[in-house]
Each structure stands twice: as C-alpha cells, then as structure tokens.
Image: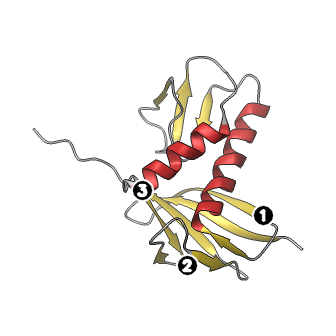
Amino acid sequence: MSVTLTVRDETTAGDVYHERPLEFPTERITVRELIRERVYQEVQDFNRKRGEQIFRGLVQPTDAERLLNGKPTEYRMKAHRDIAWKAQFEKAIEAFEHNGYFVLIDDKQAESLDQEFVIGHGTLVSFVKLTLLVGG
C-alpha cells in the first residue's frame, strides 16, 4: 500500500508558491529518498511535455536561466530538451548539503539526508530556498 504526502515550496516568510502530492511505497523514508522522488517527478513531468521551455523544479538545470519575474523554482530553457533526472538529483543533494535550501517536515527542520521520518496522515513537507544577498 502506497502513502502520499504533500510537498510545498515556500518563501522564507512562509508564503506557499507551489504544492504537489508525492507517493511512496512505504511510510518510512529518508530525506534523501524524498528529494530523489521529488526531483524524479519534476523531470519526468517536464520531459513528457515536448514543447515546454519552462522547467519547474527544485534546482536549476544546466543551460537554463531563472525567470526574472517567475517563481523561485521556474527556469527557462533555451529550447526543450530532455533533462537527466540523476544529474538534477545530484545537484539537489549538493544544494541541500551546502544550505541552498532546507526541508521542513511538519514544521521541523530536517538535519541530514539520512534522517528517517514516517509519513502520516496529513504529513506536510516544505522546501524553503535560501536567497543569496547581494551587497554593494
């Protein structure tokens, strides 16, 4: 029996700008497995839409640029091409390890990629991207 949890993208102020359900075969997963499934689904969704040039995902693909007035997870591709999910997953893991974003599981921050948690009824996971401040 599979279990479903809701994944949200949020600003540091708590505003939600994207939300999607993710299914898992078991109720006990790690943060690494959570990130892998999220990235895999994002890439599969994009690759299926042949004419699409906007990739909505956790990390920016190679040869893509962030949309100026878009959401923090929207990137414009120069032309549609298939994205390799494993490369995106590796970038996402590296970004987690270097504090590019953090993960909240029912409002508690995940400390490591190998941290396990149980998906319960209504489990909510938030991904909060951190923005680098540019100084003068």
Q: CA distance from mark 1 to mark 3?
A: 24 Å
Percent from the top left, x then y, of residue 111? Answer: 44, 72
Percent from the top left, x then y, of residue 98? Answer: 37, 53
Can the viewer see residue 57? no
**Of the two numbered discs 1 and 3 in the rendering, the one whose residue sits closer to the viewer:** 3
Residue at point 46%, 45% (across, down): 72
Q: Which mark is residue 31?
A: none
The residue at the far front in this view is 114
Q: What is the three-letter code of the residue carrying label 3?
A: Glu
How does the figure colour the protein chain or chains? secondary structure
Percent from the top left, x then y, of residue 47? Answer: 74, 32
User: Quick one: label 1 or label 3, which is nearer the N terminus?
Assistant: 1
Can the viewer see residue 119? yes
Q: SS at mark 2? A: loop
Q: Quick check: 83 left or right of 24?
A: left
Q: SS at mark 1? A: strand
Q: Which residue is mark 3?
A: 97
Q: Quick check: 25 left or right of 106?
A: right
**Of the two numbered discs 3 and 2 in the rendering, the one whose residue sits closer to the viewer:** 3
Q: Is residue 21 above or below residue 94?
A: below
Q: CA distance from mark 3 to mark 2?
A: 20 Å
The residue at the far left in this view is 136
Q: Which residue is mark 2?
A: 106
Residue at point 46%, 32% (across, down): 67
The quadrant where residue 22 appears:
bottom right
Q: Nearer the viewer, residue 36 or 124?
A: 36
Q: SS at mark 3? A: helix
Q: Which mark is residue 23?
A: 1
Q: CA distance from mark 1 to mark 2?
A: 17 Å
The residue at the far right in this view is 1
